Image: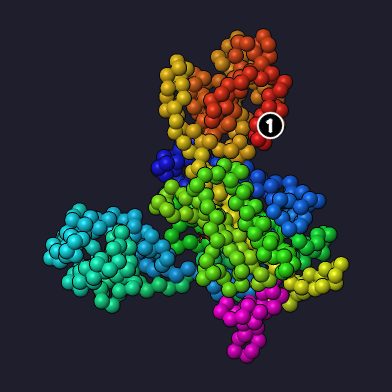
Amino acid sequence: MEMEKLVSLCKRRGFLFQSSEIYGGLNGFWDYGPLGVELKRNVKEAWWRDMVSGHDDLSVLPGAPDSYEMTGLDCTIIMHPQVWKCSGHYDLFADMMQSCRQCKKLFRADHVWGLMRETEWANAIAETLASNFDAEQIEVDAEKLAKWAKDRKGGRRLAPGLALVRHPENTLASLQQSLAEMKADSFPVLLQHLATEDKKTSGLLTPCPECGGDLTEPREFNLMFETIVGALKDESNKAFLRPETAQGIFVNFKNVLDSTRVKIPFGIAQVGKSFRNEITPRNFTFRSREFEQMEIEFFCHPDSSQSWYKYWRDRRMQWYQDLGLAGERLILREHDPDELSHYSTGTADIEYAFPFLPAGEYGELEGIAHRGDFDLRSHMEGKLDEKSDPLVVQLDEHGKPKYRGSGKDLTYRDELTNERYIPHVIEPSAGADRATLAFLCEAYREDSAPDDKGNLQTRTVMSLHPRLAPVKAAVFPLVKKDGMPEVAKDIYRALKPKFSVSYDEKGAVGRRYRRQDEAGTPFCITVDGDSLIDRTVTIRDRDTLEQTRVRIDDIESEIENRIQS
Ligand code: ATP
């Protein structure tokens, strides 16, 4: 599927709009249109229902080590600034950033080489290299290449920072050497090798992915949005928009324990907005600056935490599969030991092969992390030292904890055994917008269906799972006369309080079907001549195109069953 087609459908049919579009838009911010808002609500509601409100706490679920309880929270976006100091976000929630001295664009340092693969200029060099380079002889026509680089076709030159232009001989010598040794399969890979591993000899700097210009050295950039609370605009009133919903759960851990009768193991869930001042927001809603998260902090005894980690990892994977991401595009990826944070003994990502990513690459939908007791301990004592033993509190120059935690007792006492401990935490952390985008990508398909005259026509279908579909059913009178609209309107009104339904009587029925296919409506209910005689209608299935006759009195239960199945 081409991403442009989905983006254009999303705009045309009202799934997603650029925020503030009439003023040219704001990078990294997106609005959900009339269909999009329903879809995203359904994603969040399915998550809440499946993880929280519909959870059976009396049974041991398949794969779970024990029965457990689930409860929810809704915390504020702006919290006490100390929360972010103790959580580590104030000091560590930063990406390395580089900017281009020529075109002034900003890039996340770890994205630069990925972006390069998509650039027109890198591909143009790759082509030139390919035509000037004989793999057998490992020779590059230095002169030709330098000239090409200088008078680059189309008038735009490679910027002066690129050593290929400045000292082609050096670069080309290393290039030959590298090509001989590494058999790079693409030019950007080779370039990356020269600019990182072989920087000294090649003289090649990391070029700007946009224009090929000079990039500055990477520098830290904290992703938290700052704001001021109160009238005085000074440091002491500085606060932050939360970059994740999780911390609200940790700081309320004691409140939940004290106000409910929950016992470990149990989970607290929260859905809400988070904000990150991403350096390069891109790929539609995938990397936005304002987005929604669906997070669970699951508290358990340290001894059973590994089993709970595995349970949540598999359960969350199953959730996406059950809702339609059933194919090979969805993967579960366990982190390698060197990818893990120091406090984590296990982290897995659920990833999806989004169509805007190069073949073989996946984007994260959700991370499931075993976080040990890091968070509760930090809020008790203070910020922990990233590099040293996680149990050691980071000290300032006076030997005091660098950031003082709340000083509150966030331990848990087991009433039966009297054991007191800091619970371990398993955190399944999902993004509502990324999940919604993955469901949209997976749903998009083009096939053919017969029109009113029986001729096959191409149709675009959003095959969303019925639970997620923005509109569950559309009601049509076959024609706008003979009492059919009246019957259809009665059906519409009867269904409306139960499901999101729409009514359409305009145009040929085939075109009405296709409009609904594009919106992802799984069922179309058509009232025809026979309906007036025997009080039955046809229900047409969006995916199979099958039409079944159903009694008007049974429509509601029929739709209900089909949505759940
Ligand atoms: P990435 O590496 O892609 O920046 P992350 O590992 O920083 O993501 P987490 O901090 O684990 O992400 O956040 C949990 C989830 O929140 C992610 O799996 C993703 O679904 C969602 N998320 C994080 N950042 C963004 C963003 N900028 N836009 C949309 N969703 C996001």
Q: Is residue 62 above or below residue 265?
A: above
Name the residue at 66% across, 79% down: 391
Numbered circles on residues, count: 1
Task: Report if residue 399 is visible in the image.
Answer: yes
Q: In this view, does 459 lie above or below 365?
A: above
Helix, strand or loop status at disc 1: helix
As rendered, which of 13 and 144 lies closer to the eye?
Answer: 144
Residue 383 pos. (x, y %): 63, 77
Left or right: 57 in relation to 361: right
Task: Report if residue 32 is visible in the image.
Answer: no
Name the residue at 55% across, 38% down: 464
Name the residue at 77% across, 49% down: 56
Which segment is the magenta one?
Answer: 375-404
Question: Label 1 belongs to which residue?
Answer: 561
Residue 398 pos. (x, y %): 63, 90
Callout 1 crowding tier (Cα within 10 Å): few <14, some 14–19, many ≥20: few
Say if the magenta span includes residue 400.
Answer: yes
In the displayed image of the protein, which residue is found farthest to the bottom?
398
In the displayed image of the protein, which residue is found farthest to the left?
143
Place residue 384 in its image quadrant.
bottom right
As rendered, which of 407 and 261 lies closer to the eye?
Answer: 261
State which quarter of the image contains the N terminus. top left
- Amino acid type, mark 1: Asn
State which quarter of the image contains the C terminus. top right
Instruction: State whether the magenta stretch is mostly helix, strand or loop.
Output: loop
Say if the magenta span includes residue 550.
Answer: no
